Amino acid sequence: MTLIIGGRAQGKRAYALCQTGLGSDHICDGEVCPLNAAFDQPILDRLHLLVRRLMEAGQDARQVVLNGAAAHPELTVICDEIGCGVVPVDAFERAWREQVGRICCALAEQSLRVVRVYAGLPIVLKGA
């Protein structure tokens, strides 16, 4: 598995497509994909929004994501970094940010490669 993280609009998706050689039709968008089909494509983009949707649906987001990733070892996961900045007043928003961070830590541990993309530049954190 490859995990690609970074801020919003930093070039993560373009980097993933370049590295995998795949087209945008091979991306599952975590914001809109059916919850039961999130791992049906080789690239899962916007993991942070998938986690939010799973939490809102009352599902164990961590278990769903980790099981899905384990079942698809060639998966490329793209996630916005959402834990920086002002701490939200809303309890759900805080829980969501924490859950995304903890899931990304677990995915990074399992990943062969972890890359942070900043201003379009990839910074390899783990792997070659």
Image (cartoon, grey):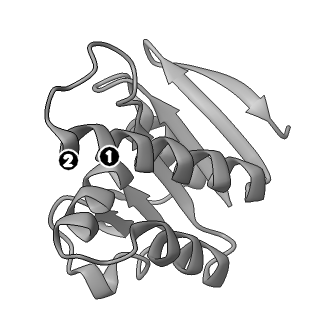
Q: Residue at x 19, y 58 (%)?
A: 31
Query: Which residue lies under the disc numbered 1?
Result: 95
Is residue 47 left or right of 18 when viewed as pictured? left
- Give the residue furthest to the right: 128
Residue 92: assigned label: 2
Q: Residue at x 30, y 87 (%)?
A: 36
Q: CA distance from mark 1 to mark 2?
A: 5 Å
Mark 2 burial class by Cα count in 10 Å: few <14, some 14-19, many 20+: few
Indicate whether 3 appears above or below 60. above
Q: Are marks 1 and 2 in contact (CB under 8 Å)?
A: yes
Residue 65: assigned label: none
Indicate whether 34 appears above or below 48. below
Residue 115: give x, y in percent of width and height: 64, 34
Q: Which quadrant holds the C terminus?
A: top right
Indicate whether 43 appears above or below 88. below
Q: Residue at x 64, y 55 (%)?
A: 107
Amino acid type for the residue under numbered disc 1: Ala
Is residue 95 left or right of 101 when viewed as pictured? left
Pick the front one: 41 or 49:
49
Mark 1 burial class by Cα count in 10 Å: few <14, some 14-19, many 20+: some
Indicate whether 67 appears above or below 76. below
Q: Residue at x 50, y 45 (%)?
A: 16
Residue 63: give x, y in percent of width and height: 51, 75
Can you tell which quarter of the image residue 8 is in? Answer: top left
Q: Which quadrant holds the N terminus?
A: bottom right
- Mark 2 falls on what kind of element? helix
Can you tell which quarter of the image residue 13 is in? Answer: top left
Is residue 12 left or right of 106 when viewed as pictured? left
> Quick check: can you spot residue 11?
yes
- Mark 1 falls on what kind of element? helix
Amino acid type for the residue under numbered disc 2: Phe
Pick the front one: 43 or 50:
50
